[in-house]
Amino acid sequence: MRSRLCRSLVLTGALTLTLVSAAGVSTASASAIGGATAPRPAQASHVLPSNTRFFVPPPADGSLSQIAGLLKSHDIKDAGLLAEMETVPSAVWLTGGTPAQVAKQVRTTLAEAALERTVPVFVVYDIPGRDCSEYSAGGAADQAAYGAWVDAVAKAVGGTRAVLLVEPDALGNMPSDCNLPTSSYPYTDAQRTAEVDDAVTSLERDANTSVYLDGTNSHWQAVGNISSRLLQAGVQRAQGFFLNVSNFQTDAASQDYGSWISSCIAMISDPSNWAYNHPDYCASQYYPATFSDFSTWSQTTAWYAQNMAGAVATTHYVIDTSRNGLGQNTMQGYTKAPYNQSEATATALELGAWCNPTEAGLGARPTARTGVPLLDADLWVKTPGQSDGQCDAAGGVRTWDYSAYTQPGWPQDAAGQNLFDPLWGRVDPAAGAWFPAQALSLAQNANPALGLNLLAGQGR
């Protein structure tokens, strides 16, 4: 393990120093790359200290070969952007395997994090019926198998400080939301809720762990609906919930959404509150705000200020900022020349904008010093540069009028077009595979910009 980590750090460091030298910058300015430290707090707590420094995993598969190729072609600038992107802390995804295998993966990561003196962020992602059997399909065979797998994660983490994000989309896409026949998808909402609730019990057992559940994103579930699901799944026994994983909603929208969810949870779980047990009473991004007009969202914030009636919001949250630097692509650019797509096509493309969109950028660097009440951290959860899946018409996330715009080499038959992504002009890599074009686009569009600003924002 240590040799693999050292090789990765040495290679990334060598690339970075080469780029620094080529840019005429003193190598002393890059000395902080490996100097992160994370002192253990005096008293163990589920709350992340503001000076938390997060773990930088070894470079993602495919990233170093892309960097090397850019250097070989003398594209020093873009190689530098990708090299810096790979030195920013991001999450480690636990996506399957046997209990013994996932325990080994956790222990390896913890040992690597100990060498960096940082706190690892794990994504626990093996729920039965994962992702409605779509691009990221998979998961444990059944509830018992999942319980054993999660217990192995918990035992491997032990008393080490770690952040655990439990099952992205698990509460946003409940089995009943998938609209699949029980003959092929035999999972129930009751089972899903019990699985997440049991995961909270297992993972939150030690005071050094900070466990967060799926709070979806501000472009998805209404506040009352996700608040109810979070409560049923045990959020009050966890540290809180996470938002915007693998999505592109802005920090401002996510912070509003997070504060509303926390307020709604407080109201509907307080027996003395007028909204007790009534999540349908909670205001949301859909009312009184107008969902598509962020300037109206202050109306929902004002509603909570006026209607809390003594309830106090205490549930914390974190936000995935790995790809939201430019917000969500509305796809309106494709209505203009040379693409000349219709408004209806642009609207359909926007509905699929969660899947490998163009014109996205890296967002705020990971930090636990947010300055926002209840917001524990900004994190890079989705690994930047990894594909969301083979985003195409067959999967329902792409549509395109090829009579209005095509290029030589693009498929001309319906079968080929059904599997093609016209936004990138190719067949996309499978979910989790490295996507060079998207990786470079994210780095070039980073907001705040990259530029030897390594580990900016982390606790000091």
Image (spheres, helix red, strand yellow):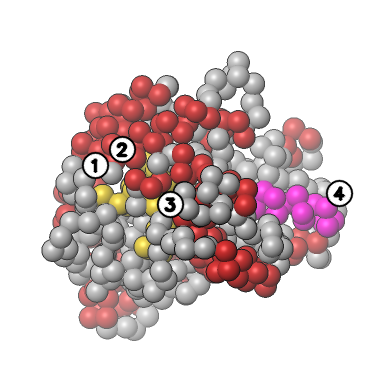
Residue 205's disc is 1
Q: What element carries label 3?
A: strand
Along the line of sight, the residue nearer the viewer: 290 or 134: 290
Q: Disc 2 to disc 3, how far (Cα)?
A: 15 Å
Along the line of sight, the residue nearer the viewer: 249 or 226: 226
Q: Where is residue 186 in the image (x, y as percent from the top left)?
A: 55, 20
Q: Using the image, determine if residue 150 lies above or below residue 338.
A: above
Q: Using the image, determine if residue 125 lies above or below residue 148.
A: below
The quarter of the picture where residue 176 lies is top right
Magenta highlight range: 341-359
Give the residue number, with chain letter if any, for mark 3: 241
Residue at x-position 33% and y-position 28%: 147
Question: From the viewer's perspective, is 148 left or right of 184?
Answer: left
Q: Which residue lies furthest to the top in this view?
A: 183
Give the residue number, with chain letter if any, for mark 4: 403
Give the residue number, with chain letter if any, for mark 2: 201
Q: Disc 4 to disc 1, how far (Cα)?
A: 58 Å
